[in-house]
Amino acid sequence: MAERNIVIIGAGVAGLTTALLLSKIPGYSITVAAKHMPGDYDIEYASPWAGANYMPVSSRGTEAAEWDKETWKVFHELALNHPESGIHLQGKSPYILAEDLLKNSSDNPTDCEIRNRSNDVGSATADWFSELLSSAPWFKDVVPNFRTLSKNELGPGIDSAINFTSVCINTALYLPWLVSKCLENKVSFKRAVFNHISEAYSLDPSRKVDLVVNCTGLMASKLGGVEDHTVVPARGQIVVVRNEAGKMINLSGTDDGDDEACYIMARAAGGGTVIGGSYQKGNWESQPDPNLAIRIMKRAVQAYPELTGGKGIEALDVIRHAVGLRPVREGGTRIEKEQMGSLWIVHNYGAGGAGYQSSYGCAEAAVKLVRKALEVQTKL
Ligand code: FAD
């Protein structure tokens, strides 16, 4: 049978993961076409700004929880066996052996700690984290070393907390690694800006395109033919510092506003420590707010004084202040196939703050739809 030509619009984590999975299927020729590629930093391109870690916010029993579950298996394997991907298990020392990190013990240094304050109930951040804040979230049997902290382990103002082993992804390494894996499988990459999704069908006038995969993230709200106005930004401001964090910490909320957050995570392979943050829905502002930056740094040092050896925020060694926009979609990530006249489209966009932790599950679901759509076309 003739090769089937597929164009993927978007080179964020959604587009690259979908390209990688599709490139493993014989008979498909894949082109990734995008305005922004790994190496670029732009407000329309969420993927480089993410922490990124694995802390499922999907609800029990949903498709999204299944996507997250599938993704953990891959991330865990990459962290254990492929350090070149830029993914590592979060622990006190980068030198701890992977096998030791997985031993079940209460003094295990593999800390991803979610701290809950009862007065945050109902805030935007606590709503976003509601599954994470449950004492028995669905993922407790998925991630290693899950446990609930005892009362005497809780710091001041904290009402409950859970702890488990997780990963942190250095996105500056992971996105190019995905590109390399795609190139190994003969995926082509091309810069392109589309005003309308149908333009992807004439990307290369010498080849008929059989199907387009739409991985445009937040910009699906503006792309002609899609214009999904249920996709909105949730603005995340972060500070990347050279100080080392021995654990990953997340709080259910802050005293500084409903849409502000407090989290700390250490990126793999010298990627620095990311401290955040905010979750400002509907806010497109690309520039860091200096006042918010101070609040982010104060909260991080208060939550984890070890970050600066007890010396306060002046001892934070800042690499950069940054802002990214999470592509939040009402109703969750859109994984659907659509026929637009004679054109076939599969959508994979709108993952909000979970684009990494759901990436393999979402891409697998999109791949299934691509296969189905191409089968239908063959029968016509
Ligand atoms: P994007 O990365 O935005 O990529 C979109 C692609 O489409 C780009 O290549 C763009 O150029 C292209 N494109 C768009 N429109 C067009 C067009 N018209 N023509 C051509 N190309 C086009 N997720 C996690 O799982 N864990 C985390 O810890 C985490 N932390 C985060 C922290 C912050 C501060 C932020 C901002 C996000 C965080 N996220 C996290 C969320 C994650 O970053 C996003 O869900 C994910 O990056 C979305 O990826 P994407 O590929 O869908 O979109």
Image (spheres, rainbow, N blue to C red):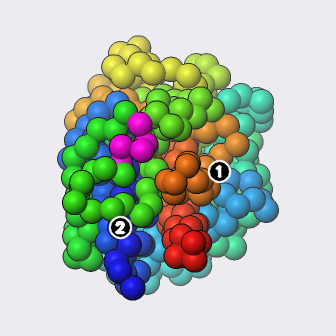
Residue occupying image coordinates x 70% and y 61%: 63
Q: Any magenta on residue 199?
A: yes
Between 327 and 71, the residue placed more toward the observer is 327
Tell me the CA gap for discs 2 and 1. 35 Å
User: Which kind of residue does numbered mark 1 sit on?
Assistant: Val
Decide if residue 324 is in sight here. Answer: yes
Label 2 vs 1, first from the N-terminus: 2
Residue occupying image coordinates x 64% and y 72%: 142
User: Which kind of residue does numbered mark 2 sit on?
Assistant: Asn
Q: Is mark 1 within 8 Å of ligand 1?
A: no
Q: Residues within 10 Å of mark 2 (few under 14, many from 20)?
A: some
Image quarter (top left, top right, bottom left or bottom right) of the C terminus: bottom right
Q: Which residue is mark 1?
A: 57
Between 177 and 169, the residue placed more toward the observer is 177
Residue occupying image coordinates x 32% and y 72%: 29
Indicate which quadrant contains ligand 1: top left
Compared to 327, does 86 lie above or below?
below
Residue range (magenta)? 196-200
Compared to 32, does 280 lie above or below?
above
Q: Which residue is mark 2?
A: 5
Quadrant of the rendered structure where residue 21 is? Answer: bottom left
Image coords of residue 111 (percent x, y): 51, 60
Q: Secondary structure at mark 2?
A: strand
